Image (tube, rainbow, N blue to C red):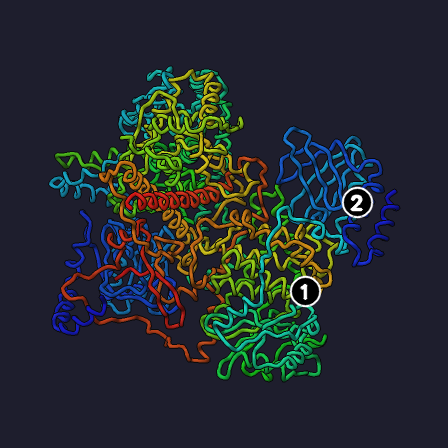
Amino acid sequence: MWAMFKQSLDELTSTTPKKEDPVKAQLLLMQLVSAETLGTTPKVEEAFLEGSCISKMIGSACLTGHHLILYSHSGDNAEHWILHKNVDAIDRRFGNDKCQITLKCKDFETYCLTVLSQEDATNIANSIEVLSSLDNINLQYPFFYKATNSLSESNLGSIEEDFLMISNVSDQWRISEVNNNFQICPTYPQRIIVPKSISDQMIFKSSEFRNLGRFPILSYCHHNGRVVMRCSQPQIGTNNRRCKEDEKLINVVLGSHHRGYIMDTRTQQIALQARSKGGGTETEFNYPQWKKIHHNLSRPSALYDSICKLVEVSRDKGCAVDKWRSRLESSNWLHHVKEVLTASCLVSQCLDKEGASVLIHCADGFDSTLQITSLTQIILNPECRTLRGFLNLVEKEWILYGHPFRERCARSVYSVGKASRDEGPTFLLFLDCVHQLQHQYPLSFEFDGSLLCQIARHTYASQFGTFLCNNELERFTSRVRSKTTSLWSHLLSDDVFPSYLNPVYQPRSDTIWPSVAPQSLMLWGELFTPFVDPSAVTRRCLRSNKLYLHELRSTINELSKEVSQLEEQEEKLKT
Amino acid sequence: MSMRRTFKLKKDIKLAGAYEHVYQLSPSSEVDGLLLPGEITVGHAKEVISYVLHDENRRGTSGLLVCTNFRLMFVTDKPPYCNLIAVDNKLIGPQDVTLSNIETIYIEKQNGKRKKLYPTSRNIKDGIQKLEIHCKDFRILTYSFKLSVLGEGKNIVRAILHHSYPQDSSLSFAMEYISKKASKETSAKETSNISTKVVSLYRKVDDWEKLIMTSQAMKGRWRITSINETFSLSATMPGLFVVPSSLSDAFLKDAIHQYNNNRLPIWCYTHPNKCSLLRSSNFREESVQFQVDQKIRQEITKCDPSGRKIRMMDLNKMCPTLQQVQMSFHKLKTSCMPANEDEYMESDGKWYSTLQTIKWLQFVSCCLEVARTCVDHIDSGLGTVLLIETLGVDWTACISCLVQVLIDPTKRTIDGLSELIQREWIIGCHPFTTRLGILHQPKKSSKFQPESSTSDHPEVCKSPIFMVFLDCLYQILTQESTKVEYTSFFLTSLADGTRLPVFDTFIFNNERERNRTLQQLNQQRTTDIETISIWDWDVQYPHHVQQLFINPLYRCKRFHHLVATTTPPLGGNSIATNDDVTSPNTLDLTTTPKVEKLKSSKKSSTHHRSASDSTCLDTTTSSMTSSSTPHGHKRINSNSYEVPYQPPQGRSVFYCAGDERPDSGRSVANSRSSSTDNMAAEDDEAVVIGLVDQVNSRAPQVAERLRFVPNSANNNNDVIGCRDDDDVMQVKTGVQYLRFWKFAYLRWVSFSQLIGGGESPQVEQENKMADEIVQLASKIEHLEAQLCNGDTSVTSPPPRVDDVTVQFVSSYFPYLAISNKSANKSTLGRVYNFSRKKEGKSTTSASAPSPKIHHHHHHTEGKPPHRPAPLSPAQVAASSHHMVALSEQQQTSEGGTYNRLSSGV
């Protein structure tokens, strides 16, 4: 029976032409699941679900195309949905009287599903296994998800808005259509901002010189006119190629008298070695106005190893008290946090204190480069510390400029060995850095830590299409933007965003310099060690401080309203 | 201001010169005005350079270094390099350090050799270049004598060394201080009657009686005994203590010697469910009179009407040894006193494993865990707990305090906590002198064998148990900041208080020692002198600094009823005709007319309240009889259960015991007992549930308007009980959840601070919100009164405090100065290194290498040399909550724009 299912599924995924109506695909899928795998039992009546973040549930388990759903049998009508996409690994433990399936999820949670019949258990496990690793984008849940209330377009990452901001500071820029239909760079958006004095032809030349066509492009323009640019490594190769257009492109940003910095997030040695593979790093000879900085940041695969160890420690309830901290340290995660923060501070300082522009790249220019460009903006630009500003930043830096979410977030910490080399929590590390900033400057962010957690969870599995695909080209071909709902629209909708606001937010107009000393860095408890103690009381207490501040904030609002009402009444009386 | 000064100086160069001459001749006359009663100078050195801590450029200020019998004082007329923001301590200046705070002294000779001085060091020669003092509060002070007259350095170092390590507590400065102070103050005594706040010291029977008489659960079962009033039976027991009433004095007098250290099991706390907490030392091993111990335990069991079994907690096994704690604290100190920034940053990557090897947090976690075990046991009514320890004066004090804080809301107020510490630690005879190492004990044995030499003698072991206790309190604070009244600053003030030998609180090993010392003093006098306790904070801090003790979140909690009562129903017309409502000060919950109105306005709404909520019933009832306002305390004794509305989602607008700040915990105890008097204690649950339903069924629209919660629908479950006022606090004890107490341990490390970040600014922000609520509420009050009857006699709302933009408060406020220049580079570590390299090349930077010492050759004319200014009260008053006003936009030479603290000097 299983083989049959597998076969038909393969057929389905391979033969379904991409343009086929996804609803039809869904139907097919559901048909398959219910008819073939579970045979006569698409629904298991006696199931028992346990999880670290939910209370124990007894009820019936039901498998749909995208979810494992558990309906509680007790009177409270509770139900719990687990997205198949969220399942990272499945452990089966089949005994004589009961069969346990442990679902290890990408958001680090684990659930334990217990059913009585071994056949059911096998079927469920096999189905989830297959359904959780479907590659076909048209079968992904976001294409089927319809938001209950229609959400308005968030309009984040709009280039016009961005351009308007930049024109306030400098008139040296223009919007170019050179990347129309992604012809010169698939990982950049179609419309881009380029220096006025650089022709599209020169940009074309420059993109040929850069790895993956990622030519130097504007990321952030500071209020003093200095800019952060990002790109990928130059393809210097063994025969020392150079590209005059590329040199001109970045020199024109500096103006005539200024110097700039090029930050390469690899060590000098690695950068030079890359020449044998056609890559390389800028030479001081060809770029005399630029000073090189090498600040080594880890590759995604190294981050992946690190986070696996970290989660192993943080989820280990039985860990000995006096081992905990050294195990945490050996995961090296906080070291990565520190390095990324340091690099970002360095760039911020170049911009703000030295008044110098900075060009940042790694090998591909869409991993550590993006971490630095976005963190720099959070440190320097108060706008990015607002809720909308932050989401805008993520959209602008990470989504539009091609962080390969599909590759990086395909698997999570429980699939050690199975994960591809492209796997890596680059984006999660960025979020952790933001969390550190937030922890150090609790007043300076409009949003609170739970927003970061929420975003982190959505990067791995989501009903929203925001984090699907690797780049704009892929999103364009799959029509992600038109067919799926955006996470940003959800987060910014009127009934959702208030719960993510920071009740003690007090805007400040200047830079926030974080401390990068190890003593100041904290493990991100909300994400990595949430409610290890499942007792409801403890959970409540953990949140109470924040909720309490929320209460105060709304009390103030209530009272202010009251005051204004009374004042109005008084005015009326007087007249 | 400085402009004007320079100008005047130019005009009066002669005057300035003359002044300088005089000043040089007799420095002590200038210092005299700064001395405390009883303080005498014992040595000084002129033209000493005091270095700015951790300053890369080794900048410093020159001035006069004075050693007195109380402290080491630095007096200068130069403006400080950094704008010192410091707690305005009446006893000690920001650049002073008490001699009892001095841990180790290092000197550096001209040849650069660094040497550690020991109390026994005799051979101190001329040519001391530098003096480095490491303090017990982790501060490092560095002075240089390179400009002073030869020999002065040697003299002052000798003086410091001689006076820093007293060997007898009767030589303590406190004795000098109080005897001199008393003679001075007899004339001006009537002025000091303002401070009426009294913390029970538990040296009189009254205090104890208040404690046990008010508790219904204790009535008749426990009694106070005074067998040890003269301390003849036991040196280490309190003069008064509480025992089961069935044990006779004669029996106790006999039994006391069967216990180690002569400490009987004594009573600490009784829960309303009649389970108690007791502490004692071990029963003597060599004793053969087992029946004594048995009898005592039997009688303790009998104190519990249900006769539940006693649980013995052997803290010797559960808690770390004194020696371990001392070792751990020593390591902690080492890692928190980096010599420079590089050393601090160097711990990169090792910090967590260092923290682990230090073990400090593990010990804190362990204490909390033991406390939680006791709390669970007592709270769930499993029976009485008896804490046992070899000496019965260390961990028993710590654990018993923690248990009471966790279990009893009245112990979470500042007064409640103070009384608790007074009772369990001071009266309970924790040997502070020994444990804090206040007295120097000349040792015969080598000091490098601590394990073997001291663990055998816990009587003489130095061990900062009290610090562990404070750290535990800090962990409770971070986890549940809405439920405790104290702040981190209160805790550090306590810690610092142990090193301030002005109070009689922390300088004795036990009550007998205190009594004897005082007797000796009194023999020479006609009138008895009064000692000063640390709880008399007025001696140390002005009122505005004391405000920093109060946690704004806890303060806010008391506003809820204010909101509730001042909010009339929408379109309501004649609320304020009621005479009850005159000013915010007299607002209270039990204004029945309002309740009636609300009740009639909407009766039908029913609010489901789950059974779990009945946990707070006890407190609900107790609170009905009392209420308080943020402005003052007002208690209304009402026997009726007419309680105002209940907001939805189970949030209670009324007051549980923890909500108010009772005077010395009395009112709550009263109200608690009165409420239990009013109903049969055993079957009260049903009654009260009915009551709550009744309450819930009112709760009309006002309640809805009090909806504080953000509109996230799915966290309703969490919301219920977020103001649940559970009596028992749930703390997480795992090492993962504990925080390193940076505010206490790293507060002097300037480069670890954040400007505008960290805990302090958040507290300030919360304070602002609290103020805003009070102001809005009183404004509403005012407007209502005007609207309804044109009554203008209502006190007008207090003028709104100008919004002082308190944007940039350091994370260690109010401790550490923010220095002018290092602000940005310091937080960045390696970034700074980078920019420094670059600076050298480009030389565009304006900052030339600054001279080693900055010498201003101007003096204020006529004025005595001023000390780095603490906050003036006026400045502080500018901001309603004593955070420093500061918003000076400063362009530093490095081009940084940094708002920083300005002391206005």
Residue located beneath label 1 in the image: A472
Q: Amino acid at mark 2?
A: Met
Position in image of residue A65 (x %, y %): 76, 45
Viewport quadrant of the C terminus of chain B:
bottom left
Asked where in the image residue B432 lies, by quadrant, the reply is top left
Residue B426, placed above or below residue B880: above
Between B575 and A376, the one nearer to me in the picture: B575
Position in image of residue A130 (x %, y %): 79, 48
Residue B665, placed above or below residue A462: above
For the point 49% across and 28% down, the residue is B605
For the point 58% across and 46% down, the residue is A529
Position in image of residue B439 (x %, y %): 31, 44
- Chain ID for label 2? A
Between A471 and B35, the one nearer to me in the picture: A471
Residue located beneath label 2 in the image: A30
For the point 22% across and 66% down, the residue is B1
Secondary element at image label 1:
helix
Residue B716, placed above or below residue B50: above
Residue positioned most to the front: A575
Q: Can residue B453 be seen at all in this image of the molecule?
A: no
Q: Amino acid at mark 1?
A: Glu
Asked where in the image residue B179 lies, by quadrant, the reply is top left
Q: Can residue B900 be seen at all in this image of the molecule?
A: yes
- Whole-angstrom CA distance, mark 2 to mark 1, is 30 Å
